[in-house]
Amino acid sequence: FEKLTEICLKYHLRTKSIPMGINLEKYRKKLHKVASMIADNEHTPTINQVIDELVNDENSYPSDEKLRLVLKTLKVSSNLISVPLLEMLEGDEDNGKISGPDVSVEHIMPQNSKKWIEYIISKHGYLENVPDGDEHDEARIKAQKDANEKAKSMHSKYLSWLGNQTLLSIPLNSKIKNDSFEIKKPHYKNGYKITGKLVSNDDWTEKEIIDRQTKFAKKLLEHLDLTRCKN
């Protein structure tokens, strides 16, 4: 039963939770067929037969190539999706560890960007070529405005990327959620392994988010391959 639950969860994540463009009706029909197979007391299917049924139609089971492309820039706005995906990745680091009841999703670059705008501008060099002049100089005012817009755009683009999300206890998340990366880092040391690894980063910019997303995508492609669950 545990193996079957794992397979169904991975199928759900791969085909429905992750936006793969799968037709909802085909998804429902496939699950209904598998449920009927399992309910057949006279011909109870093996785990391998269930998997074969789930993966035999690309219209209800997206190809690895399609999944790879989606995972590359995957945005997740629901904790119901982020948590199981991050738990899979945590299991790789900590021998199958499952998060506790106080788990929450931490946005490393936080949802509230107020404290991060200047940090983003500085770390991405958005003001490197600002012309000399006092703070009332027209060119400087325009440059600052442009830099603010670039920072807001960067924040909006990468905020919900899975690479910008990690696991953290609810109390700790509430305590540090909008703080700078420098303040957050010491709190990341204890607890979840995927969170602790963030301490090795000096900065948290577009580059770090993309790099982490790329690593996550490679691992999740393996986790969500149902054929790997075969006996």
Image (spheres, grey):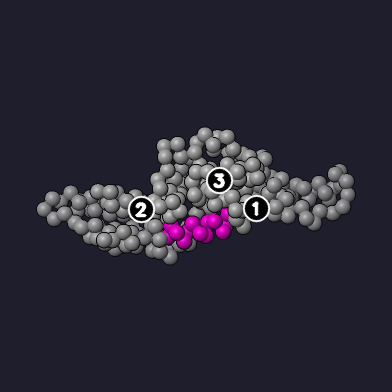
Please tell me which residue is depicted at 57% across the width and 41% down the height of the picture. Answer: 187
Where is residue 213? Give x, y as percent.
53, 56
* Magenta portion: prevailing SS class: helix
Rate crowding at label 3 as few (under 14), some (14 to 19) or many (20 or more) other CA atoms within 10 Å: some
| Mark 2: amino acid | Lys
Residue 218 lies in the magenta-colored region: yes
Could you tell me if residue 149 is visible in this image? no
The magenta span reads 209-221
Numbered circle sitting on residue 202: 1
- The CA span between labels 3 and 1 is 14 Å
- The CA span between labels 1 and 2 is 34 Å
Please tell me which residue is depicted at 23% across the width and 53% down the height of the picture. Answer: 33
Residue 212 lies in the magenta-colored region: yes
Rate crowding at label 2 as few (under 14), some (14 to 19) or many (20 or more) other CA atoms within 10 Å: many
Mark 2 and mark 3 lie on one chain; the one further toward the N terminus is 2
Please tell me which residue is depicted at 18% across the width and 49% down the height of the picture. Answer: 39
Mark 1 and mark 2 lie on one chain; the one further toward the N terminus is 2
Please tell me which residue is depicted at 57% across the width and 51% down the height of the picture. Answer: 198
